[in-house]
Image (cartoon, coloured by chain):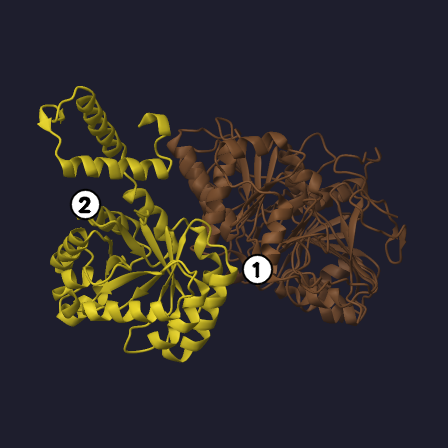
Amino acid sequence: MDIRRSMLYVPGNNPGMLQTGGLFGADVVVLDLEDAVAPPEKDAARDLVSRALRVVDYGRAETCVRINSLDTYAGQDLPAIVPCRPDLVILPKANCAADIRRLAQLLDRLEEPDQKPIGIMAIIESPQGLAEVYDIARSHKRLAGLLLGAEDYTAMVGSLRTKAGGEIAVARSLLTNAAAAAGLQSFDAVFTDANDEDGLSKDTLLSKHLGFSGKAAVNPRQVKTINELFNPSAEEIAFAQRVLKALRQAEKEGSGVASISGKMIDAPVARRAGRILHLAKTLGLVKGEEE
Amino acid sequence: MINAIGRDIPEYIDGFGPVRPFRGAFAAVPDPAAYAPPLKATKPGHRKLVSTLEDLFKHLRIESGMTLSFHHHLRNGDAVPNLVLDTAAKLGLRDLSISLTGVFAVHAPLIEHIKNGVVTSLRSSGLYGPLAAAVSGGLLAKPVLLHSHGGRPRALKSGELKVDIAFIAAPAADSSGNISGLVGPAACGSLGYAFSDADRAKAVVAVTDNLVDYPLIPASITQNKVDYVVRVDSIGDPKGIVSGTTRITKDPVGLNIAETAARVIEASGLLKDGFSFQTGAGGASLATAHYVSRMMEKNKIAGSFALGGVTGYLVDMLEKGLFKALYDVQSFDLESVQSLGRNQNHIEVSADLYANPFNAGSLVNNLDVVILGATEIDTDFNVNVITGSDGVIMGASGGHPDTAAGAKMTVIVTNLLRSRQSIVVDRVITATTPGETVDVLVTEYGLAVNPARPDLKERFADAGLNVRDIHELKRLARNMAGRPAKIEPGGRIVALVEYRDGTIIDVVRAESR
């Protein structure tokens, strides 16, 4: 599975930031045509974003465009964006499974035959979207992940948005559960105060502990913290190494059951260990022979 | 003739004279004959206090054709050159030569004095504001001499620059001529650029708006060097002199560059006990200090000294014990002014001690690392800090060439692209600092190492830093920004760029239209 710890939003109407978006180590660079761009600037931003996708080298980052919602400008965004071959598009205001299928149809129609299919990420940011999140998660094979849009969601529910995030606890858990059930990645909402480094660290650790695969960032200065906290910790890596070693040992001895400190290693624990070590190896946190 | 960095410089320049071309950063040897001003005798009871500048001009018999000098510690709040030159104009003086260590927007009235023939010659470390544009357009018949901070005390000591009257803006002075920058409405901290003037000018005048009871303690320029004290209403506007607090940048690209620069310093092997360091007050330079500071704290490194224009950030590092001493030639903010007054390890130094290449050893020679900026850098690592990409003067040599020559490692930090222009070019429009003294360029797209330093290149690669060839960085920028139209100012010479040793490294020409 692709490593997506951090997704950095870059305003689609800001040439300077479109040019430098790939420099901060974000795993996914999201060129934003939606909330960052006021309606009168949508046309100009569409031009800038397509130009950036063709010209700017985003290095190792995946490229992604947050298009406008299906009931606003998505119909104009997609014909401009799809030929520029981003890796992903983000659909905001995903309310039901039909939304995803509609977007997938549009992509089917617009992609060239030789084009690598563009993946879809869906933002769940309405009470209806959250109520239908499991259906959404299972809606289409293009779907790669779910994002939580906490600002819109709390506004629509009428709850107070706080840094502690008690008001989105259930939304977070429903979303990670639906994503896990459908084999998708899940991404937590942005932490909006770019100057509160401590707050970002706390919120990101919470995201990780709740099972999110990664987190969105509104400011390039947030990327490093998010990446570091989503990296497997030294303890996690050491434990995963012990798990795999015990499994190999058990296999060699022809035993069907492996255990660590008297605790049996079941299949989910083994899978998690494999995932952590894969991540650690890809990120260069362990060398090949240390496996 | 072609100098050592391939610049075509005339052998003789009208309004300047014969030209010694730049031959290499350490090639020039000084003429052993030093210059000293005439001795003078002062009898007990002599009164130095003069009530107006006009009276002073009469007492000192200031005449047309003389050379007057000023320091720029009051930066964009400075009132003194304007007051003195208004007086000169009123008294009908003409053809004055001015040595002002830095020119800011506040000095715009000089333009009128030049137009009216009151001032006909100018030296400075650099020009900002309206006068910069006017000089670039050919305001002065004689080319302006642009010197480095270390080159100026050299010229004063050698007699290449002979000052008749040094006007020293004094935030505090007593009636016998003791001077301090620490207190008063126009407090500016260090007076480092004025020290050599106090030593070498034929006559020295303290201009103050803050006359204190005798004796002024502590004094940084003492009464044995000062002939007269003049009182004026105000020597400057505090708002233009020191900023409240200098803060590190929040610009993510600037922070990215600064963090890489700090990792470069760590990987160089120089960041260990006894480490010495200079950085500017600009956003990215200051941010580099921030990251270096964190590394020093984490690894418990006890540094030796920090140097240069001083900010509150360096004061914090001194107070945390990260450095033993802070050498201050210019104080940029209130924190550094206050610290200079209270901390005995925060030391006021002259431009001579700071950076003069022709003495028994200036502080820049003890620097491990200096972090510097650039308006342009070329693929030979020559740096421009004087003209913009349009060839118009907009900056200063300052201590740039001095620290680059002195430090064990010189790091240039800059955005690769600025306002749609590549900062890496084939050939800088104006060379101020020769590539042989520049080791590393750090940009947001990676860093490049001078081929003369394979040792550093290897260390950086081992540390996993993104090391690229400087030509590759240039190509990268061109791919994004395109190739700009060539600017080749071909008009007459409006300024000479003097290297710290007194040779000419480049000239600035007016744009030919």
Q: Position of residue A100 (x, y in %)?
A: 25, 67
Rendered view: A229 above or below B241: above
Name the image quarter holding the C terminus of chain B: bottom right
Q: Pointer 1: residues within 10 angstroms few (<14), some, or many (20+)? A: some
Q: Quadrant of residue B31?
A: top right
Q: With B240 as the anchor, is B510 left or right in this view?
A: right
Q: Nearer the viewer, residue B449 or B107?
A: B449
How far apart marks 1 and 2 lie (CA) works out to 41 Å
Q: Position of residue A269 (x, y in %)?
A: 16, 36
Q: Nearer the viewer, residue A254 or A161?
A: A254
**Residue holding disc 1:** B480
Q: Nearer the viewer, residue A242 or B441?
A: A242
**Which amino acid is tagged 2?**
His
Rendered view: A155 above or below B156: below
Q: Chain of mark 2?
A: A
* Residue B108 visible: yes
Q: Which chain is yellow?
A: A
**Residue holding disc 2:** A209
**Which residue does the image show at 86% across and 54% down from the upper left?**
B16
Rendered view: B478 above or below B286: below
* Residue B163 visible: no
Q: Position of residue B123 (x, y in %)?
A: 75, 55
**Which residue does the image show at 9% across and 27% down from the upper left?**
A263
Rendered view: B302 above or below A20: above
Q: Which chain is brown?
A: B
